């Protein structure tokens, strides 16, 4: 039983997943700070204090929900513009650069060129 657990933990996918989760949590803290300490105060200067926690419809308090939706949208925009867009640009550059030919491809091209000269 412990042997199976040890093999499960030692698999590369589990270690990669654990690292991704830890990095994701750390990045989440950065994005939370970006939203709370930079973006929200800027929005507050532009349009007043952006806090809807006291907003109610009848006896139903929907203010915290509205705050959560706004926070989510700001975080999603931050992730998109700070991670997705730059990564897509880098990936496009890497995809646009063709890989150099392998040695066997280079030899085949030379053989082709020599045969073309003889014909």
Image (cartoon, helix red, strand yellow):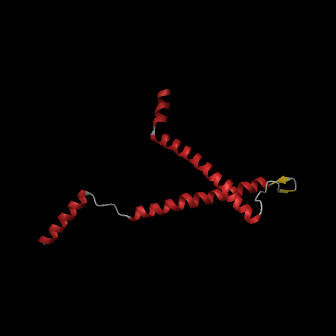
Instruction: Identify the residue shown where x is 82% and y is 57%.
Output: 55
- Which residue extends farthest right? 58
Q: Residue at 48% of width from left, 31% of height from top?
A: 6
Residue located at (77% from left, 59% from top): 49
Position above or below: 10 against 29: above
**Picture mark count:** 0
Q: Is residue 26 left or right of residue 99?
A: right
Q: Kindly identify the residue that appears in the image at 27 percent across and 58 percent down.
A: 102
Residue 71 on image: x %, y %: 69, 56
Residue 26 percent location from the top left of the image: 58, 46
Q: In which quadrant of the rendered image does the C terminus lie?
A: bottom left
Relative to 96, is 79 above or below?
A: above
Asked if residue 11 lies left or right of residue 103, the reply is right
Q: Quadrant of residue 34?
A: bottom right
Residue 44 drawn at (x, y percent)? 74, 61
Q: 38 or 17: nearer the eye?
A: 38
Residue found farthest to the left? 118
Q: Nearer the viewer, residue 89 or 114?
A: 89
């Amino acid at each position: 039983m412990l042997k199976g657990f040890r093999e499960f933990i030692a698999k590369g996918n589990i270690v990669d997943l654990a690292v991704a989760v830890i990095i994701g949590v750390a990045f989440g803290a950065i994005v939370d700070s970006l939203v709370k300490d930079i973006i929200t105060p800027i929005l507050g200067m532009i349009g007043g204090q952006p806090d809807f926690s006291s907003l109610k419809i009848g006896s139903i308090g929907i203010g915290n929900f509205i705050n959560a939706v706004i926070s989510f949208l700001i975080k999603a925009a931050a992730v998109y513009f700070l991670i997705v867009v730059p990564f897509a640009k880098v990936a496009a550059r890497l995809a646009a650069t063709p890989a150099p030919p392998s040695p066997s491809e280079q030899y085949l091209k030379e053989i082709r060129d020599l045969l073309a000269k003889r014909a």
